[in-house]
Image (tube, rainbow, N blue to C red):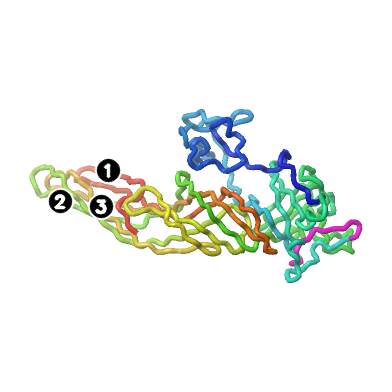
Amino acid sequence: MAHTPNPESPLLKLPRFFSLKADNADLKNPPSDTDASNRFKLQPEVAPGKVALSSVQDGLFLKRFNTQYRALLEEPNEIFAMVEVVESSYYVVNMPEYVGFKGSNAKYLTCLVDYPVILDPFALTEESADVRLTTHQVEYLLNGKIALRSNQAASWTSNNYWKASQWITPDGDTPDHPECQFDPVRVNSTTVALKSANGLYCKRGSPSFTNAPDAIFAEASDYEETSSHLVVEEAVMSRQIFNVTYLLDLASASEEEPIGVAYGSATNKGSEPAEMEISVSKTTTVSNTRSFHNSFTFSQSITQTLTLGVPFFADESTEIQIGAEQEFGNQWDETLSEEVAYQTTYKVTIPPGKTGTVQVVISTAKLAVPFHYKTRDTSLNGVEREPVDRIDGVFDGVLAYRTDAEIYDGTKTYRIPVPMKLNVTK
């Protein structure tokens, strides 16, 4: 009988969400999109290298106490509210739930041992690999480690967690046991190494067991050894992505750059100060790459179907809108060229005999919009899995525009910044 992990295990990583409501403090599902008490904004660079979180409901910043955070502060306190940020995206490992591992001999890891008869865990080639033998389930634990379940062993015995004393076997009873826990270390964009409880990395083969050259042992001193490298492949044939909900108020801007400068001027030929209109216009072409992605560390090559609307700015608007639902194919990613036409008029009071000028710098920035979504996967042997709620989606590619006008009225210069998309058509 297959072993079912205990959902109350202190080590199983069940997601929790911040909430201003005490009765929601243990939320295990994505919070409601309409309940502002569950929503928080990241306030970047409130101090060098530090950020803070503020509530969408009332704008108050979270204050850290011994065992909880509370939204109490009108301004972020450096001691109790600020969080130090370290760039770790290169090192963070986030693997899909079902994976296959390929060893340094380019063969798949099966991790099946009928002790004391040794089977070579890496003995299968890509052509002959049975997906029931090579699929492993990843469970993230609250201590930052992972537990791995052998998919085939799960249908044979309740002892199906990878266990590492030295020899790796799928006979661990529970992920709570230290020998069933591994530290995943990113080697590159496709490869991981696994550090065992004994402080050593899992590797293929051992000089002590020459009769088992492809067995897996926890005895590599570091992950520089190529025999410790495991190529990660998601064990999914296809994926449907649907029920997309964009979190528009959490959109963030990046890659801001100027795309053009517009000029205009007018001369007051009269004998009295006069309010005069100065028109400026500019047309240019902008290249924009749009894409959807999630938080998985390793590149995915599965067939995906996305059903969703694409966020955009409507003409003359400062609010993001969502287009009609469309269906996109695998790895949706496209580059578009858009013509941007800017035209507006400024009223400037100019002294007699003077010339007023307007110079407008037009800049563009790319917005990243996070979203919640559901996935429905089909396994490598054609079995459709239950839909899963996910919260790690990001759409990159909504173009926002900003203008910064420098106005000279014949005697002095002043600036008028406009924050977002004024009189811009696509």
Q: Give the foreground label among 3 and 2.
A: 3
The label on residue 267 is 2
Q: Marks 3 and 1, Cα distance to the nearest angstrom?
A: 17 Å
Mark 3 = which residue?
344
Range drawn in magenta: 105-117
Give x and y (percent) for residue 84: 57, 39
Q: Is residue 393 magenta?
A: no
Q: Earlier in the sequence, mark 3 or mark 2?
A: 2
Residue 158 to residue 235: above or below:
above
Q: Earlier in the sequence, mark 3 or mark 1?
A: 3
Q: Give the foreground label among 3 and 1.
A: 3
Mark 1 = which residue?
414
Give x and y (percent) for residue 318: 36, 48
| Type of the residue with mark 2 | Thr
| Image point (29%, 44%), residue name | 415
**Mark 2 touches mark 1? (CB < 8 Å):** no
Q: Marks 2 and 1, Cα distance to the nearest angstrom?
A: 18 Å
